[in-house]
Amino acid sequence: MFGTKSQKDVESVQPIVNQILQIYPSLQSLSNEELREKTLSLKKTIKDFTSDESKQIADIKARIEADVDMDVDAKDNLYKEIDEIEKEIDKKTEEVINQILPEEFAL
């Protein structure tokens, strides 16, 4: 109930720190190359988690580029759709980063 802002901040991140400390010993024995591969694997996890949305954006952009005579309002609507999909990508990226955060920090 009482305590300083600093104490509250420490309490809020302590569970993550504990997870990192649990993971860290298992990573100590990995070589530099294995650590690089692990990092690439985590990056791929993030990319794969949002791949459907990225494909949707690419498809919409291709439609826009393919139709040079597209109405300005139609283009605007498609760009708004892209904006919404990008917001979803941001949410999903945050979600997956929170899932892999302890492991990433342990690296």
Image (cartoon, rainbow, N blue to C red):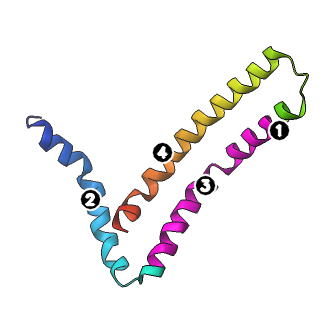
Q: Element at badge 3? A: helix
Q: Nearer the viewer, mark 2 or mark 1?
A: 1
Q: Residue 47's mark?
A: 3
Q: CA distance from mark 2 to mark 3?
A: 25 Å
**Looking at the rendering, in which quadrant would you find the N terminus?**
top left
Q: Which residues are magenta?
A: 34-62
Q: Which residue is mark 1?
A: 62
The type of residue carrying mark 1 is: Ala
Q: Earlier in the sequence, mark 4 or mark 1?
A: 1
Q: Earlier in the sequence, mark 2 or mark 1?
A: 2
Graded by Cα atoms within 10 Å as few (under 14), some (14 to 19) or many (20 or more), the crowding at tag 2 reads: some
Q: CA distance from mark 2 to mark 4?
A: 18 Å
Q: Residue 105's mark?
A: none
| Residue at the image position 56 percent from the left and 55 percent from the top | 46
Q: Nearer the viewer, mark 4 or mark 1?
A: 1
Q: Nearer the viewer, mark 1 or mark 3?
A: 1
Look at the picture and state if 5 lies above or below 22. Answer: above
Q: Earlier in the sequence, mark 1 or mark 3?
A: 3
Q: Residue 61 lies in what quarter of the image? A: top right
Graded by Cα atoms within 10 Å as few (under 14), some (14 to 19) or many (20 or more), the crowding at tag 4 reads: few
Q: Residue 94's mark?
A: 4
| Residue at the image position 74 percent from the left and 19 percent from the top | 76
| Residue 49 or residue 38, whichever sits in front | 38
